[in-house]
Image (tube, helix red, strand yellow):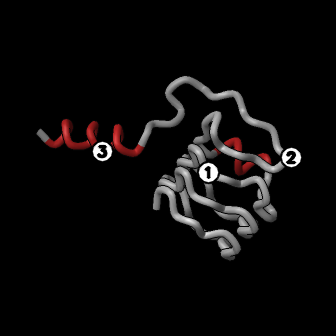
């Protein structure tokens, strides 16, 4: 879904764990109780996301380009916490051989 504009959608309680939402426009999107565990949000615009919490952000994968709402803070990244989806696919492909 990289680069898609889904602003205004209701994603309440959506299971988005491990999804790649990099560079997605999530302004005015309702994210109440959405599972963002290891969701790639690199470069995504969450600046006006509705009902997103610090806990959700802390579980997601973000980078310096990710736009957060003013009330939330950028978590410190733990080394190795998030792997790019392309890298994950390469690792899985190597394991199959």
Judging by the rendered image, the residue that carries numbered circle 3 is: 89
Residue 40 in the image, given as x and y percentages of width and height: 53, 48
Upstream in sequence: badge 3 or badge 2: 2
Residue 41 in the image, given as x and y percentages of width and height: 58, 48
Label 2 Cα neighbours within 10 Å, binned few <14 / some 14-19 / many ≥20: few
Name which quarter of the figure residue 62 lies in. top right
Name which quarter of the figure residue 92 lies in. top left
Residue 14 in the image, given as x and y percentages of width and height: 61, 69
Q: Which mark is residue 79?
A: none
53 relative position to 22: left or right: right
Q: Does residue 74 sit above or below 11 in this rendering?
A: above
Label 3 Cα neighbours within 10 Å, binned few <14 / some 14-19 / many ≥20: few
Q: Is mark 3 on a helix, strand or loop?
A: helix
Give the residue at x 71% y 65%.
Answer: 31
Q: Which of 73 and 23 is in front in this view?
A: 23
Judging by the rendered image, the residue that carries numbered circle 2 is: 70
Give the residue at x 79% y 59%.
Answer: 48
Q: What element carries label 2?
A: loop
Q: Nearer the viewer, residue 44 or 39?
A: 44
Judging by the rendered image, the residue that carries numbered circle 1 is: 44
* Residue sitting at the far left: 97
Give the residue at x 76% y 61%.
Answer: 49
């Amino acid at each position: 879904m990289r680069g898609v504009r889904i602003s205004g959608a209701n994603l309440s309680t959506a299971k988005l764990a491990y999804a790649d939402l990099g560079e997605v426009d999530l302004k005015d999107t309702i994210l109440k109780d959405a599972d963002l565990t290891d969701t790639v949000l690199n470069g995504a615009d969450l600046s006006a996301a509705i009902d997103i919490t610090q806990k959700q952000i802390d579980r997601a994968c973000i980078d310096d380009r990710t736009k957060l709402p003013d009330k939330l803070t950028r978590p410190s990244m733990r080394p190795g916490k998030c792997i790019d989806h392309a890298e994950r696919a390469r690792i899985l492909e190597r394991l199959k051989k």
